[in-house]
């Protein structure tokens, strides 16, 4: 089986084809925002992130050398963190021609499992991700979005079904996983992928982490070897999600930041106005419950009655945009 590895194409040779996919044209001459997604499947230490970093290195080198275009690398663990980062840094989006994003360990925050309001909004936003970036100020360019996960079925179909899928390992004891991988790449390549998985994960032959099997949509699978791992030369912006204990420890610390207070004030005033509950809300039990609801929906914070009371008092005595909005709305 190891003789099959001799058929592997070095990433340096295949990179030309990847460039055509990830950079189909000069980003500056695009008529709108284009999308080039990729899905990476593999167990821990199988080389998923290293593969993405190597691709990113070559893409950036190509963009700078040929088109003098700038590129933004973002590594995150939740889709909403990416959107929030670009909303707070619109100047990056307006000036950027190429957004290179990876959602690492995509199943960590249960993209496949949760059916909450936030999850539905996340999925809906991704379906129109091109237009989201246009709304943020990106007039033209390319958004390369990569989802990396340990298992194929841990990611929702909306996120995992990319035109380019790269398998690093396969869970061959899972019937669904076997069926999906074998259907995509055929018996020969699937058998090789099982062999790589066994020797990499069980026999600890770490050198095999440089291999992967690419499956382009409508094309033939190919074995690829990352012979020269690289890291993006200009660095990667890493967005780590806030820990739960930090997130809920002191809501006032979040509220006191100018941007979040403004966002909360606008959402609060709008919601109260829509429900016709501006008058007589101050100091009432219903008022505190609405404060709790707004914190959950708009800021993703969980608060108890005592914290809601403290925040409600600080909001109702706020001498800024919120007070003007409430007065104007009433």
Image (spheres, helix red, strand yellow):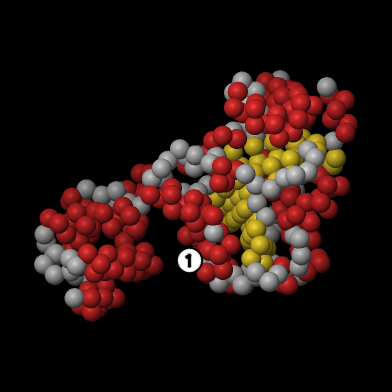
| Residue 202 point in image, percent of width and height | 67, 20
Q: Residue at x 85, y 40 (%)?
A: 9
Quadrant of res 100: bottom right
| Residue 190 point in image, percent of width and height | 74, 28
Q: Residue at x 70, y 31 (%)?
A: 183
Q: Is residue 224 visible?
A: no
Q: Residue at x 29, y 56 (%)?
A: 295
Quadrant of res 139: bottom right
Q: Residue at x 25, y 67 (%)?
A: 274
Determine crowd level at label 1: few under 14, some 14-19, many 20+ residues with C-alpha closer than 10 A.
few
Is 153 on the left or on the right of 54, as rendered?
left
* Residue position for label 1: 88
| Residue 254 point in image, percent of width and height | 34, 58
Is 318 on the left or on the right of 65, as rendered?
left
**The residue tagged with tag 1: helix, strand or loop?**
helix
| Residue 180 point in image, percent of width and height | 65, 31
């Amino acid at each position: 089986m190891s003789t099959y590895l001799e058929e592997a194409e070095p990433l340096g040779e295949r990179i030309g084809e990847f460039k055509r996919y990830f950079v189909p044209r000069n980003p500056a001459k695009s008529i709108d925002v284009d999308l080039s997604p990729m899905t990476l499947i593999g167990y821990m230490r199988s080389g998923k992130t290293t593969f993405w970093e190597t691709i990113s290195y070559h893409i950036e080198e190509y963009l700078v050398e040929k088109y003098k275009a700038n590129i933004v690398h973002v590594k995150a663990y939740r889709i909403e963190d990416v959107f929030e980062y670009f909303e707070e840094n619109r100047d990056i989006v307006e000036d950027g021609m190429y957004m290179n994003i990876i959602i690492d360990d995509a199943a960590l925050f249960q993209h496949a499992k949760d059916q909450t309001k936030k999850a539905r909004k996340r999925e809906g936003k991704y379906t129109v991700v091109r237009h989201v970036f246009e709304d943020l100020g990106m007039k033209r360019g390319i958004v390369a979005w990569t989802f990396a996960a340990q298992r194929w079925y841990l990611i929702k179909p909306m996120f995992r079904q990319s035109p380019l899928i790269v398998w690093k390992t396969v869970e061959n004891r899972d019937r669904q996983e076997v069926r999906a991988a074998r259907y995509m790449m055929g018996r020969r390549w699937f058998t090789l992928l099982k062999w790589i998985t066994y020797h990499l994960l069980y026999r600890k032959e770490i050198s095999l982490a440089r291999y992967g099997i690419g499956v382009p949509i409508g094309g033939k699978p190919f074995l690829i070897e990352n012979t020269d791992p690289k890291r993006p030369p200009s660095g990667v912006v890493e967005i780590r999600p806030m820990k739960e204990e930090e997130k809920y420890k002191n809501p006032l610390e979040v509220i006191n930041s100018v941007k979040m207070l403004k966002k909360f004030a606008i959402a609060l005033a709008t919601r109260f106005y829509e429900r016709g509950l501006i008058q007589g809300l101050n100091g009432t039990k219903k008022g505190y419950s609405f404060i709790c609801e707004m914190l959950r929906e708009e800021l993703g914070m969980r608060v108890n009655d005592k914290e809601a009371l403290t925040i409600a008092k600080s909001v109702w005595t706020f001498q800024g945009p919120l007070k003007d909005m409430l007065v104007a709305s009433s």
